[in-house]
Image (cartoon, rainbow, N blue to C red):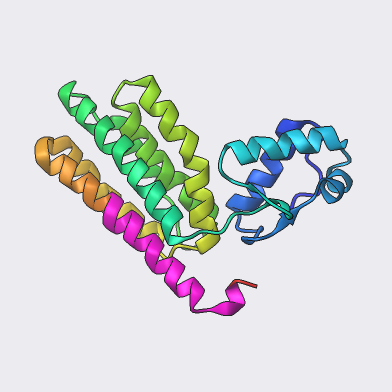
Amino acid sequence: MREQAGSTPGSIAQALRDDLLDGLLEPGTRLTEESLSARFGAGRHSVRSGLQTLVSEGLLEHQRNKGIVVPAVTTERIDAMCSYRSILELGALRLALLQNANFDAVDEAVRRLESMTAETPWRHVIEAHSAVHTEIVTASGNPRVLAAHRACANELNCMLATIRAESSAEHLATTHRHLVGQLRAGGESALKALDDDLELGGRAMMHLALRRRSEAPHLLS
């Protein structure tokens, strides 16, 4: 974990966000103002503000009698996130197709994903994968849809880091290269390809990873 991030609420929030994306904070971990003040050399007001930023992003939650904790990844949380993401991305794609948008930026994001190897830290693979989907939404040209999508991106990425969803940079690159081809083909084939990716490569993969994690108690300690 990063021991010093500066004393501002923003830098404290970013350091903790990085810890979550790196999978360093397990579900149920309690984050106290006292320990974080000592870690960052910051006042409690700055720590409290940083924590509230992450609570508002859905990365942490306030639990009665416990305070601020890392939330558990549950089947209900996965379904809620994936359903919301599908509404945003499929709606954005429909807008993009109506405008005959090109998907060059999506292609470039897939190229970055293709450049990653088995040695690439999983956190960077998650972020590169997220960038592909962000570019799909960007192609809609609708700033409100894009803002809503970006608002849930960190929460989704932290969920993926926590449950260690089993995939690889190579597999993700291959499936998303196919997706780009279908997006450029347009029509219902584009919408079906994105829906399949979100359901099979997203929701189903996360449920499988969560089941495997629950079957290995040592990973939950």
Looking at the image, residue 204 sits to the left or right of residue 3; the answer is left
Q: Quadrant of residue 142?
A: top left
In-front residue for pair 49/15: 49
In-front residue for pair 197/152: 152
Looking at the image, residue 102 sits to the left or right of residue 54; the answer is left
Q: Quadrant of residue 209?
A: bottom left
Magenta stretch in the rendered image: 198-219
Q: Magenta stretch containing residue 177, yes or no?
A: no
Looking at the image, residue 206 sits to the left or right of residue 3; the answer is left
Q: Quadrant of residue 128?
A: top left
> As displayed, is residue 213 above or below residue 1?
below
User: Which quarter of the figure is the C terminus placed in?
Assistant: bottom right
Q: Is residue 186 visible?
A: yes
Q: Position of residue 166 (x, y in %)?
A: 42, 66
| Identity of the residue furthest to the front in this view | 64
Q: Position of residue 50 (x, y in %)?
A: 72, 36
Q: Position of residue 20 (x, y in %)?
A: 62, 51
Q: Residue at x 87, y 48 (%)?
A: 34
User: Which quarter of the figure is the N terminus placed in?
Assistant: bottom right
Q: Magenta stretch containing residue 200, yes or no?
A: yes
Q: Is residue 122 visible?
A: no
Q: Position of residue 82 (x, y in %)?
A: 36, 49
Q: Residue at x 25, y 37 (%)?
A: 90
Magenta-highlighted stretch: main secondary structure? helix
Q: Residue at x 69, y 59 (%)?
A: 29
Q: Residue at x 68, y 37 (%)?
A: 52
